[in-house]
Image: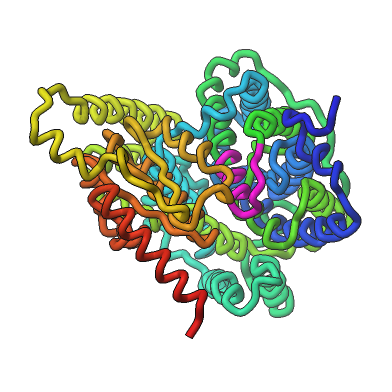
Amino acid sequence: MSVTNPNLPKSIQAFRTYTAQMFLRDIMAGLTVGLVALPLAMAFGIASGVTPQAGIYTAVVAGFLISALGGSRTQIGGPTGAFVVIVAGIVAHFGMSGLAMVTVMAGVLLLLMGLTGLGAAVRFIPRMVVIGFTNGIAVLIASTQVKDFFGLRTGEVPSEFLPRMKMLAENFGSFNPVALGLGLGTLAILLLLPRFTKRVPASIVALLVCTGVSVIFHLPVETIGSKFGGIPEGLPPFAVPEFHSEDILPLIPSAFTVAMLAALESMLSAVVADGMTGDRHNPNVELAAQGIANMLSPLFGGIPATGAIARTATNIRAGARSPVAGMVHALTLLGILLAAAPLASYIPLTALAAVLFVVAYNMGEWNEIGGILQLDFTAKSVWVATFALTVFADLTVAVGVGFTLAALLYIHRVAETTSVAPVTEEYIRDGLPHSLQGRILPPFVTVLRIHGPFLWGTTEKLVEATTDLEVFQPVVILRLRNMTAIDATGIHAIETFARQLQDSGRTLLLCGAMQQPSKLLHGERFLDRIGRENFMANIQTALDRAKEIHAAAEVSKAGP
């Protein structure tokens, strides 16, 4: 079989043009992201209701397999914040054997999705649903870390949000000032150090400094050692978990939720990686790799895994060129397990809580809320419902209700913008400025058109049509005359396209939007990102604007 086969793992494809220089860059990137992943893996393990080593074992085993077998060159796999809430709930109700069953079942579902070509379908999840449960998960993660950050003395913290917050409020008087001070110090390093340098992982520096202070001054704070007895030194232990057949049916909804979250986050991470590297991942190969990784992770004491956006971005910025970097990242963590595991017992839990506070904030996509609030009531209701149900109910209910509302909104949008009316002279006259008939397109302009509703489930067509930006001219006009409807997912797709064009030195102009799309596209946030001056009434004014941009560029090239 040829190594150019697109259905082969990217690791095999990469070796066709692999060089020694690329290998050195992959090693450095892998070492860097391995150090970044260490505190995150432990923190996600603790927040999920399991041990810190379970998080590391997941990053080692699943992280290696996802890189070795996946469809992305630079994707980094491991435990992520998306799973924290649902994993903690499964452990609380079904124990570790239940978690192992869910992880394996989710792995089987992911593998089937990859083998049957459903990888691309994951991209059709409505934007409002994605943002809603991402915001909700971020709030839940932060709420689970309040106890350790403040050093509260409480009993077992409830898994439900409202009872948890009630217990924390009732016991807030028991907070430990030393733990709080150490946690605030960790936060300060995490937030301030990246402003001065991004070469050194802030999370590692924060843990080293705060752990050192705790040990030197014998601070009375809870540590990994005092709560979990430290981290075992050596290879991840292989053991077949106990499986209870009577738990299969009750755990099926959780398995579907884990599989969908893993698929969604891995695809989002892979898309981010594509945007940073110019590569294009294979979603089906990636999901198959995610499935295999999750099927094997529980055999080594691991938990669910998926692609991690922040670690993937770190990997790319550190110079990764192939999946070898991801494999080196996993081996780096394995080396730490073999050589330095006992030292982790001194890490204060308040420091790890601070790390997760930052993770929760970064994953929340809070900057998207401003744009959501500018949408109409029906669009906002999908986000509000998904967010509220994620926080106050559970992810399975939230995603199900979010999908249902989004589907109903989809039908509403199509019905609302479908019209039947006689053709009049006024209609013909109004359409003339939008017509391309008889117009000569300048050589520095590319015109794209969107025909029909541009809603979730259809926005991938824009991605497919604009894969190679090099074929586009300096000015790209997106003609919206025949785009009948748009939603938040469509707006996000156009924003992403505009940003890609801007990064490549090109300008995007929009023209001819009809009533419903025009109303949403004229939101303050969207206009600020696109540029008010680049939103035209029709194709003629767009061509005139393109000539102005071209003339200004020519003057700039000529110099003073």
Q: Residue at x 83, y 42 (%)?
A: 236
Identify the residue shown where x is 42% and y is 48%: 135
Q: Is residue 265 visible?
A: yes
Residues 72 and 394: in front is: 72
Residue that protrudes farthest toward the bottom in the picture:
560
328 left or right of 123 in image: right
Q: Quadrant of residue 50?
A: top right
Query: Would you place residue 5 above or below residue 148 in this image?
Result: above
In what quadrant of the picture does the N terminus appear?
A: top right
Point out residue 28 in the picture as x, y percentages from the top left corner.
81, 62
Q: Main secondary structure of the magenta part?
A: helix
Asked whether residue 92 appears in the rendered view, the answer is: no
* Percent of width and height locating residue 47: 58, 49
With 457 as the anchor, is 102 left or right in this view?
right
Relative image position of residue 415 (x, y in whole percent): 22, 25
Q: Out of 24 and 338, give the one closest to the viewer.
A: 24
559 falls in the magenta region: no
Decide if residue 322 is on the left or right side of residue 131.
right
Q: Is residue 272 magenta?
A: yes
- For this rendering, which residue is in front, 159 or 189? 189
Which color scheme is applied? rainbow
Tell which of 448 and 45 is nearer to you.
448
Say if 285 sits above or below 441 in the image. above
Residue at (68% x, 53% y) in the render: 42
Task: Please state the horizontal and vertical placement of residue 114, each as a whole percent of the image.
Answer: 65, 25
Is 299 located above or below residue 499 in the figure?
above
Extent of the magenta region:
266-281
